[in-house]
Image (cartoon, rainbow, N blue to C red):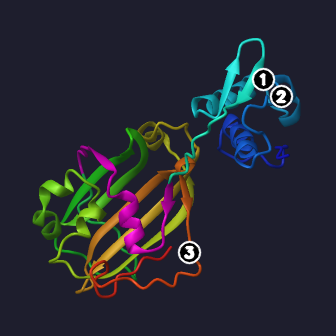
Amino acid sequence: MEKLNSADRRGQIPAYIQVASALRRRIETGEWLPGRKISTLEELEQEFNFARVTVRQAVGLLEKEGLVTRQQGRGTFVNEHVNDKRWLRLETTWESVITSIKENVPKFIKVATPPPFPKLHEDEGSMASEYVFLRSVQLKDGVPYAVVNLHLARDIFDQNRDAFLKHTALSVLATLDSVDIKEAHQTLVIGTADRETANLLQVSLSVPTAECRCVVTDQDDVAIYVAEITYRSDCMKLYMNLLDRVKPTPKALPRTRKMSA
């Protein structure tokens, strides 16, 4: 049974988030089965050595997520049907990434003073002459799952402005026959939500997040797509096919596209 002690408590992450994570893990692993009663607040208070209000907040968070239900006079029970919240698979191929996001909807946020250029690392190509900056919250079924800060080359944006303002930019980019993509890669680190991100994603301050950086370059080695994407950690999982023997078809994959984690 996963517990927290004083040595396990982590810096700036609120105590109730830490407790909720430990309790959520018990449900995900089947330690607490559907329909079964979980430990009482008193038992959890003693186990984790946190104040009652902290434990109550943690259980309340699980209830909000649809994992448990509190029944007056009886206790708190694991729900019979718990939806898999980790619907978003962070994929490692171009086609699978596009497929996973193409039906999702961006809600654009107006930025008063957008940064004119992205910051490029040494191996990320050269700058385009001009960029469009797009900030959005990405939604699935009306629920926010990611905040995106994107620099898109102006000439690419102008090719299909309406589509880029209605759909996820990477899925639109993949449909442009005029663009020959040389390389695409993404990196992933684990972070925590700041106040603004927490508000946009409707999560608590300092909860864990997955922070992705995705860069796409064209045949001239120009960075035409540079995105910083912050995902809710409770909706995503990293998927890697270690024995992928399926070769991409020419129509699905231009020349030397690749996606690596």
> Left or right of 37: which side holds 189?
left
Q: Earlier in the sequence, mark 2 or mark 1?
A: 2
First reached walking from the N terminus: tag 1 or tag 3 = 1
Q: Closest to the observer: 235 or 146?
A: 235
Q: Amino acid at mark 3?
A: Asn
Q: Which residue is mark 3?
A: 241
- Mark-to-mark CA distance, 1 and 3: 44 Å
Answer with mark 3 or mark 2, whichever residue precedes in sequence: 2
Pointer 2 residue: 45
- Asked if 126 appears above or below 233 in the picture, the reply is below
Q: Would you call the spot at circle 1 few (<14 residues within 10 Å), some (14-19), or many (20 or more)?
A: some
Residues packed near mark 3 inside 10 Å, few (<14), some (14 to 19) or many (20 plus): few
- Nearest the eye: 82 or 204: 82
Residue 259: x and y in percent read: 42, 76
Q: CA distance from mark 3 to mark 2?
A: 41 Å
Q: Which residues are magenta?
A: 88-113
In terms of secondary structure, where does tag 2 sit? helix
Q: Is 222 covered by the magenta stretch?
A: no
Residue at 59% across, 32% down? 66
Using the image, determine if residue 90 lies above or below residue 251. Answer: above
**Which amino acid is tagged 1?**
Arg
Q: In the rendered view, does 24 fall on the left or right side of 193?
A: right
Callout 2, which amino acid? Glu
Residue drawn 34% across the image and 56% down it: 149
